[in-house]
Amino acid sequence: MTAWEGTGEILIAFFLVFGAALALVGSIGLVRMPDFFMRLHGPTKATTLGIGSMLTASFLFFLLRENTWSLHEILVTFFLFLTAPVSAHMMAKAALHLKVQGQKNPEEADDRTQGRSVPNGTPSHDDQVSQPPPDAIKP
């Protein structure tokens, strides 16, 4: 084994582990985020970069082992980076068209309304209009 092969294997291992970690973070983000628009962010950013990194590792593997350029990995990477943002943009536009409500304040997340769309102006059972007591109003 030459020094270049050892370095190549280290690079391949790095891209595989880095890509797997990014894909895991994106998948966890898909599950854990509270509303639709935040859920779009995980797969379109972290998972796309994770898969791209794993495809780079595959490209390097075939380049170092067989001394050939692997057109498959290049094409898959190209179409992945081309289609993922476009599909996320189209889903976000469709959600805006359907008036899917995003969460106003993520820190005050309520488990009962996570991920559900609430039509504009429709109060839920939690939206109680509180009136001040009559003696609190002074002229």
Image (cartoon, grey):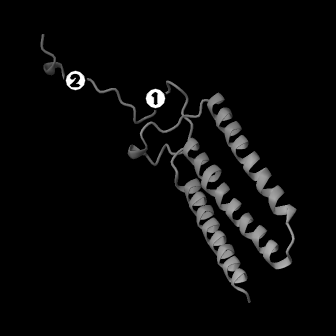
Q: Position of residue 31 (x, y in %)?
A: 57, 56
Residue found farthest to the front: 3
Real-space Cα separation, disc 2 to disc 1, in angstroms: 20 Å
Residue picked out by circle 1: 123
104 over 65 or under it: above or below: above
Task: Give the camera-side residue of 69 and 131.
Answer: 69
Q: Amino acid at mark 1?
A: Pro
- Pointer 1 local density, CA inside 10 Å: few below 14, some 14–19, many at least 20: few
The quarter of the rendered structure image containing the C terminus is: top left
Q: Reading the chain from its start, which is encountered first: label 2 or label 1? A: 1
Residue that appears at 72% across and 41% down: 86
Residue that appears at 73% across and 87% down: 2
Residue picked out by circle 2: 132
| Figure quadrant of residue 92 | top right
Circles 2 and 1, Cβ within 8 Å, touching? The answer is: no
Residue that appears at 69% across and 61% down: 51
Q: Amino acid at mark 2?
A: Pro
